């Protein structure tokens, strides 16, 4: 389920051949591997801020080049035809301006392909914020609760990118994930959206926070006929070609 948005994004990149591609926010190299498989003759690499993620990516893809970088200031090398980002720019402050700068750095015909979760209005995330507001830990989680902003509107992205592009495609896809109850939703979110909320808590506070969050999820996500619940997950996609 996790690789489907990455595959869906890559499928819409309108390039048959490229010289160089960079997976921005590459993590352990999952999406980098998809890019390398589609463009076997290209120089494919990735950038990430986490040394641990980069270590895993290098072990997974020894023929690719990986570097540690902060996307807020990173700039691609000349000759880069594809800048690809799967579920990372929602964490970058003022990311629309950063994406505009990266798009401007591409040569004519180059493509910026980006996918971001657009799910802050879903119960999975509104209830996370609600749980974080509990007086027992609200002070600790104030920064986490303000860490990720609601995405700009499609109109805003369009007006920002259209003057720079020969082709611009922006769309939403809603993925409906069958999950093993509230526990399944929590497990799904532990490595992403929940981390900023759980990491600052003490060993005693973490299970209490998660139990409270789980009780709220159980009310918001009713059990379906097969015993599972459906996690609705909207994502925003942008494919911009210079």
Image (tube, rainbow, N blue to C red):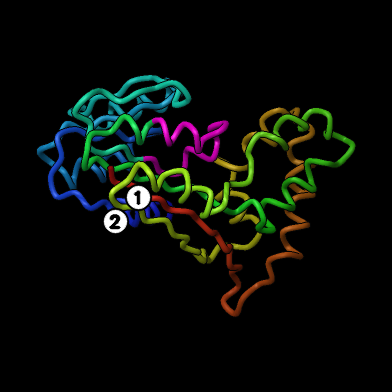
Determine which quarter of the picture holds residue 135.
Answer: top right
Please tell me whether residue 43 is drawn above or below residue 114 in the rendered image: above
Rate crowding at label 2 as few (under 14), some (14 to 19) or many (20 or more) other CA atoms within 10 Å.
Answer: few
Segment tinted magenta in the rendering: 85-101
Give the spatial CA distance, label 1 vs label 2. Answer: 7 Å
Residue that protrudes farthest toward the front in the picture: 163
- Residue 239, labelled with which disc? 1
| Residue position for label 2 | 12
At 39% from the left and 22% from the top, the residue drawn is 74
Determine which quarter of the picture holds residue 145.
Answer: top right
Is there CB contact under 8 Å for labels 1 and 2? yes
At 35% from the left and 50% from the top, the residue drawn is 239
**Secondary structure state at the residue bearing disc 1:** strand
Expressed as whole percent of the image width and height from the top left, the position of residue 140 reads: 79, 28
Q: Is residue 107 magenta?
A: no
Please tell me whether residue 234 is drawn above or below residue 68 in the rendered image: below
The quarter of the image holding the N terminus is bottom left
Expressed as whole percent of the image width and height from the top left, the position of residue 128 reads: 72, 47
Please tell me whether residue 216 is drawn above or below residue 110 in the rendered image: below
Expressed as whole percent of the image width and height from the top left, the position of residue 118 reads: 56, 52
Expressed as whole percent of the image width and height from the top left, the position of residue 236 reads: 48, 54
């Amino acid at each position: 389920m996790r690789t489907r948005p990455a595959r869906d994004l890559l499928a819409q990149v309108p390039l048959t051949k490229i010289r160089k591609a960079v997976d921005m926010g590459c993590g352990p190299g999952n999406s980098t591997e998809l890019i390398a498989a589609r463009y076997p003759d290209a120089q494919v690499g990735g950038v990430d801020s986490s040394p641990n993620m980069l270590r895993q990516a290098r072990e997974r893809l020894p023929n690719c080049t990986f570097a540690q970088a902060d996307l807020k200031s990173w700039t691609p090398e000349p000759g880069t035809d594809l800048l690809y980002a799967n579920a990372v720019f929602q964490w970058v402050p003022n990311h629309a301006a950063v994406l505009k700068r990266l798009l401007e750095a591409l040569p004519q015909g180059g493509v910026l392909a980006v996918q971001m979760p657009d799910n802050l209005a879903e119960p999975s995330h509104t209830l996370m914020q609600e749980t974080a507001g509990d007086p027992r830990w609200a002070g600790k989680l104030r920064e986490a609760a303000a860490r990720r902003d609601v995405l700009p509107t499609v109109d805003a992205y369009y007006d920002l990118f259209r003057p720079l592009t020969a082709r611009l495609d922006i769309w939403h896809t809603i993925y409906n994930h069958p999950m093993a109850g509230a526990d399944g939703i929590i497990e799904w979110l532990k490595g992403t959206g929940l981390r900023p909320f759980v990491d600052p808590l003490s060993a005693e506070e973490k299970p209490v926070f998660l139990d409270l969050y789980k009780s709220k999820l159980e009310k918001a996500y009713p059990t379906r006929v097969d015993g599972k619940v459906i996690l609705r997950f909207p994502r925003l996609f942008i494919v911009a070609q210079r």
